[in-house]
Image: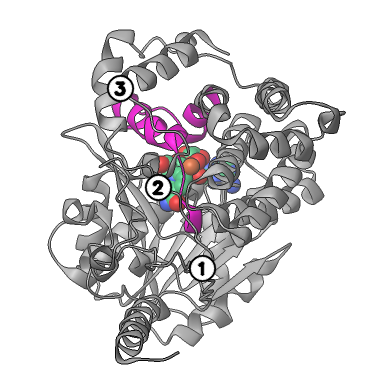
Amino acid sequence: MINRQSLQTISRNLSTLHKATKNVASASSVVFVNKRQQVALPLNSNHKFFSTSLKSMDQGHYSIPDGNSIFFAPSQNAIGVNSVEQLGGFVNNLGCKKILVVTDKPLVQIGIVAQVTKVLEKAGISFVIFDNVQPNPTVSNVNEGLKIMQKESCDGIVSIGGGSVHDCAKGIGLVKGNGGKIEDYEGLDKSKKPICPYVAVNTTAGTAAELTRFSIITNEVTRVKMAIVDKNITPTLSLNDPVLMMKQPPFLTACTGLDALTHAIEAYVSTAANPITDACALMAIELIGEHLSKAVANGSDIYAREKMCYAQFLAGLAFNNASLGYVHAIAHQLGGYYNLPHGFCNAILLPSVMKFNIPAHAKKLARVAKTLGVKNVDNMSDYDAAYEAVKAVCKLRELVGIPSGLNGEKIVKREDFDVLADHALKDVCGFTNPRVATKKDIIAILEESYKGL
Ligand SMILES: NC(=O)c1ccc[n+]([C@@H]2O[C@H](COP(=O)([O-])OP(=O)(O)OC[C@H]3O[C@@H](n4cnc5c(N)ncnc54)[C@H](O)[C@@H]3O)[C@@H](O)[C@H]2O)c1
Ligand SMILES: [Fe+2]
């Protein structure tokens, strides 16, 4: 029966939905709306990220009141051997006058940047190179790139590199388009305007930063990695060509591959997971279980490299929409404080956080075990099978040559764990972890990961 009150409710819901879709349309081409209740949020003040209130929706949070979901992704994504050859056409279509190429020095030195810029040259594209991005990119890196972009009057960006390069490029675009300073954008959807056309050419597999709305920038003063989550930094186009990834040494391949596994597992058990992100996460886990060790063992195995491109991309789609958990919330602190590689930190923390999450999501973690190829999982209880998932991740980590504990890193001091735990609890990535942790829990995870699981 329709009465005035129900009409008002329908109209209010439609207007909220309309606003949400309008916000998203500029950044992504895919908007999925489903009516299922999406998030079971603990009543904890930390968990504001996917808040379900109308008010929070108006502020730009992502859960529509009755639990609908919105899917974020770049509008075009090229993946596969020699896909870089298509770059000239893609960039020309953006209609920019001059492109800022953002990259890092090692990639210039080993010739990967030239492999890409020669395609731009062939297409007659005018560009200038900024190559001073460092791993775990900093506020200064963003500021330096921004200065060059302004001085050279660039109106588009192409990033060539791994997560550090893409994140720095996103930071440059964000401040160029919206003013202020990069620190103003820490948190969720702080920007008002879309950034300039932006193409991300990926060289690691990977962070998936070439497709996400995340940018992780280290504040050198506080030694904290700021998590910027903003729909406006979603790249216009992403490109993953395994040919550009062949020169990754085994340690980098292993770290970045385990970063992708962490994305998939954290997104799969996230409180904001939905059937679309689950499908992406599971396929990513299966591909990584099958192909990561091959890519580490033989860097020239182009087939394994290509499968890892797909795997990390799928994992990226999953976490770009379901977000992450405590592995990333804690890894950001280790990376920011000690400048350790991001994938390395994740690889060490992942088993401990999975173990911590078993009481909240045994069934899903049991499925992770099965997807990683653990035998006889169907004959076990969900809890036993979930433990098998933890063991399977430890085994894969060992197989690809990553140590089990942080204690091999002289720079890491246990007396820092207190302050690291404080910061980790504030990191936006932890807000969708399926089990809510206290500071004591985070310190216990750090202690366990220090000794090694
Ligand atoms: N924005 C996101 O969604 C997101 C997600 C996860 C991680 N991150 C961030 O990404 C950063 C880590 O990125 P990363 O792991 O891709 O590494 P990276 O970009 O920091 O690169 C590490 C090193 O590998 C080199 N390298 C890159 N590609 C190579 C190749 N093909 N061959 C040889 N060497 C190569 C680089 O020159 C650099 O010296 C961290 O700062 C992390 O916080 C971002
Ligand atoms: Fe990551």
Q: Look at label 1 and name its amino acid.
A: Ala
Q: Which residues are magenta?
A: 320-348
**Towards the viewer: 271 or 291:** 271
Q: Which mark is residue 446?
A: none
Identity of the residue drawn at 41% across and 60% down: 213
Q: Look at label 3 and name its amino acid.
A: Lys
**Towards the viewer: 77 or 131:** 77
- The answer to the question of whether label 2 and label 1 lie on touching residues, with beta carbons closer than 8 A, is no
Residue 190 x, y percent position in the rendering: 22, 62
Q: Is residue 220 magenta?
A: no
Count residues near mark 2 (Cα–Cα under 10 Å), then give few for <14, some for 14-19, many for 20+. some
Q: Which residue is mark 1?
A: 73
Q: Is residue 332 magenta?
A: yes
Where residue 429 sits, quadrant-wise, is top left
Taking the view exactly as shown, the residue that stands out farthest to the left is: 180
Residue 97 visible in the current orientation: no
Residue 263 x, y percent position in the rendering: 55, 44
Q: Is mark 3 within 8 Å of ligand 1?
A: no
Q: Which residue is mark 2?
A: 41
Report the Cα–Cα distance between label 3 and label 1: 34 Å
Where residue 378 sits, quadrant-wise, is top right
2 or 1: mark nearer the eye = 2
Q: Which mark is residue 439?
A: 3
Secondary structure mostly taken by the magenta-highlighted segment of the chain: helix
Count residues near mark 3 (Cα–Cα under 10 Å), then give few for <14, some for 14-19, many for 20+. some
Q: Look at label 2 and name its amino acid.
A: Leu
- Element at label 3: helix
Report the Cα–Cα distance between label 2 and label 3: 19 Å
Q: Earlier in the sequence, mark 2 or mark 1?
A: 2
